[in-house]
Image (cartoon, rainbow, N blue to C red):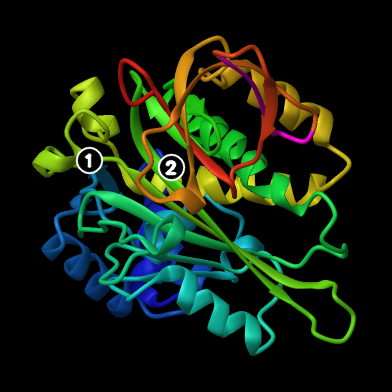
């Protein structure tokens, strides 16, 4: 971290005034450098009180995604593999490039804005600055392709856990991997694999996450489908807190793969609102078909969705083959 971010981390983690001399000794830099860093932070909107013979105290923080903000909530060791960018075309593409060059597992890329954000099936994912979290996480599991499709469902659970721990908000999951608040989408997940050609084993998995946090409006075509945490709760949030919780929960996921399946499957089923609902099933390969009416019966052990069609037949659906939508609404 640079001097400004290092000073910010100390201020965020100190409930009392901390002297310039104390920060100088902790960081191994001059008091003049500390003073300069504080002045820069104030220009960025940080409210910092300065009192002679007492030092500095952070009174209020703007909603900024920066290395200092996010890493203030992480250990120094964990913060080493967290890359925070003001803007990037795609955090997934940026991290895939790093992975191809040998980046270590657990490397994280976070951006305040994406200019070419990606959703599932090649769709664009709106990623404006100053309101969302766009985060990509690198896994290097020592496994083949068996059960790897379950990673996305595990990630959905990790995101709901992170939101709860960061802000105390309970969210739900719409099969396969949409995170919902009040039956409207607040988050998308895009998982991309890289396979070793010779062995057929996985070289890397990049998990991309986009969360609507502080957006105050959406285009007409997304109204009734998408929302943000701020819109639904009438509250603005510091995104850095959620970003740090996401990293912690993704670390937990990676450490638990695949032995912790019981927890993730149980939590996924408990938070999933698709089961028990009437819905339409659309075959992805059929393009814009009219869909078939069905009822969602259960989530299977492999995270597929068991449905019963109106003719009485049942089928286990996987996310790569179909998409589902509620008959009376998005969920």
Left or right of 300, for residue 291: left
Left or right of 15, for residue 329: left
Please state the total of marks drawn on the protein image. Answer: 2
For label 1, the crowd category at 10 Å Cα-Cα, with few meaning under 14, some 14 to 19 and many 20 or more, is many
Magenta span covers which residues?
302-309
CA distance for labels 2 and 1: 12 Å
Q: Is residue 293 above or below residue 116?
A: above
Quadrant hosting residue 167: top left
Foreground mark, 2 or 1?
A: 1
Residue 85 is situated, as x and y percent measured from the top left of the image, at 35, 72
Compare marks 2 and 1 and give the one earlier in the sequence.
1
Query: Dots 2 and 1: beta carbons under 8 Å?
Result: no
Q: Which residue lies furthest to the bottom in this view?
A: 101
Left or right of 93, for residue 252: right
Tag 2 residue: 242
Which residue is pictured at 20% across the width and 60% down the height?
129
Tag 1 residue: 214
Residue 46 is situated, as x and y percent measured from the top left of the image, at 19, 53
Q: Is residue 200 above or below residue 253?
A: below
Q: Is mark 2 on a helix, strand or loop?
A: helix
Residue 7 is situated, as x and y percent measured from the top left of the image, at 38, 64
* Magenta highlight on residue 34: no
Q: In which quarter of the image is the C terminus?
A: top left
């Amino acid at each position: 971290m640079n001097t400004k971010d290092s000073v910010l981390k100390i201020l965020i983690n100190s409930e009392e005034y901390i002297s310039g001399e104390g920060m100088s000794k902790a960081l191994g830099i001059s008091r003049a450098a500390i003073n300069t860093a504080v002045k820069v932070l104030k220009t960025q909107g940080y409210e910092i009180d300065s009192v002679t013979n007492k030092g500095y105290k952070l009174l209020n923080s703007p909603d900024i995604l920066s290395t200092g903000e996010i890493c203030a909530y992480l250990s120094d060791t964990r913060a080493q593999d967290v890359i925070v960018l003001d803007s990037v075309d795609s955090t997934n593409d940026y991290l895939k490039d790093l992975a191809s060059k040998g980046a270590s597992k657990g490397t994280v890329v976070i951006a305040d804005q994406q200019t070419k954000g990606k959703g599932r099936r090649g769709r664009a994912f709106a990623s404006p600055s100053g309101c969302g979290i766009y985060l990509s996480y690198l896994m290097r599991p020592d496994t083949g392709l068996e059960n790897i499709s379950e990673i996305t469902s595990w990630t959905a659970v990790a995101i709901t856990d992170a939101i709860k721990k960061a802000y105390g908000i309970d969210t739900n999951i719409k099969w396969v991997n949409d995170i919902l608040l009040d039956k409207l989408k607040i988050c998308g997940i895009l998982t991309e694999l890289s396979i070793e050609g010779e062995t057929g084993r996985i070289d890397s998995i990049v998990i991309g996450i986009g969360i609507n946090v502080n957006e105050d409006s959406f285009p007409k075509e997304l109204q009734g489908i998408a929302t943000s945490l701020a819109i639904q709760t009438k509250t603005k949030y510091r995104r850095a807190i959620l970003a740090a919780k996401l990293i912690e929960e993704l670390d937990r996921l990676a450490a638990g793969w695949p032995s912790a399946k019981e927890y993730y499957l149980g939590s996924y089923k408990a938070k999933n609102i698709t089961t028990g609902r009437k819905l339409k099933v659309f075959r992805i390969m059929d393009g814009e078909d009219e869909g078939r009416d069905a009822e969602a019966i259960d989530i299977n052990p492999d995270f597929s969705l068991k449905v019963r069609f109106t003719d009485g037949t049942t089928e286990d659906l996987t996310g790569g083959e179909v998409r589902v939508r509620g008959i009376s609404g998005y969920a």
